């Protein structure tokens, strides 16, 4: 098996804050990640508005030639512990399946790390489903370390 193609020089990736008009494509990307399930567009629009009401909770997209090809969310929160430093949580990272392995995810995560540095975050964390082994290798390749355990419970 050949190594994935690096970002080719003519492929300029732009990461930017998402707009409401991006939501149908973002939902399509999520459907590719989660087996076709996602909220309807009108519900996504309401959630998007709620996210934007938070001081530092944003949906971002990656574009290539004006086409949205990836997305992630970034939440930065200030906590009392760690001397009042900020902490960041990355969620819902996905790149169009046809373009995976081309460096788009790496560019998105570099963008997220830079936002975290600008905001004085002491850490940027994310979680990943246990079955997504390719994603785990990707994150480890970016310098993420497995840390502790992630727990969840149905409310």
Image (spheres, helix red, strand yellow):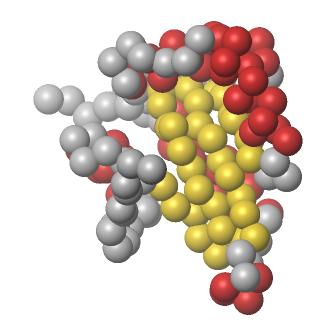
Which residue is at 45% across, 50% downward? 155
Which residue is at 71% across, 75% downward? 79
Residue occupying the far left of the picture:
1
Which residue is at 66% across, 68% downward? 87
68, above or below 103, in the image: above
What is the quadrant of residue 12 in the picture? Answer: top right
What is the quadrant of residue 107 in the picture? Answer: top right
Residue 10 seen: no
* Residue situated in front as seen by the camera: 24 or 63: 24
Q: Position of residue 75 (x, y in %)?
A: 68, 52
90, above or below 35, in the image: below
* Residue situated in front as seen by the camera: 83 or 144: 83
What is the quadrant of residue 143 in the picture? Answer: bottom left
* Residue situated in front as seen by the camera: 21 or 69: 21
Q: Position of residue 53 (x, y in %)?
A: 85, 41
Which residue is at 81% across, 48% downward? 54
Residue occupying the far bottom of the picture:
83
Marker count (numbered):
0
Image quadrant in which the N terminus is located = top left
Tell me: 85 left or right of 3.
right
Residue 79 seen: yes
Q: Position of residue 39 (x, y in %)?
A: 55, 18
């Amino acid at each position: 098996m050949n190594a994935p193609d690096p970002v080719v020089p003519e492929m300029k990736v732009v990461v930017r804050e998402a707009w409401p008009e991006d939501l149908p494509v973002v939902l399509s990307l999520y459907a590719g990640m989660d087996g076709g399930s996602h909220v309807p567009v009108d519900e996504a629009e309401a959630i998007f508005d709620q996210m934007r009401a938070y001081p530092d909770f944003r949906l971002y997209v990656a574009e290539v030639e004006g086409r949205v090809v990836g997305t992630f969310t970034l939440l930065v929160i200030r906590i009392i512990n760690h001397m009042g430093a900020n902490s960041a949580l990355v969620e819902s990272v996905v790149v169009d399946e046809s373009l995976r392995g081309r460096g788009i995810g790496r560019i998105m995560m570099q963008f997220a790390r830079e936002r975290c540095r600008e905001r004085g975050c002491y850490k940027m964390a994310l979680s990943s489903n246990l079955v997504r082994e390719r994603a785990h290798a990707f994150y480890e390749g970016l310098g993420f370390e497995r840390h502790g355990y992630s727990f969840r419970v149905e409310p």
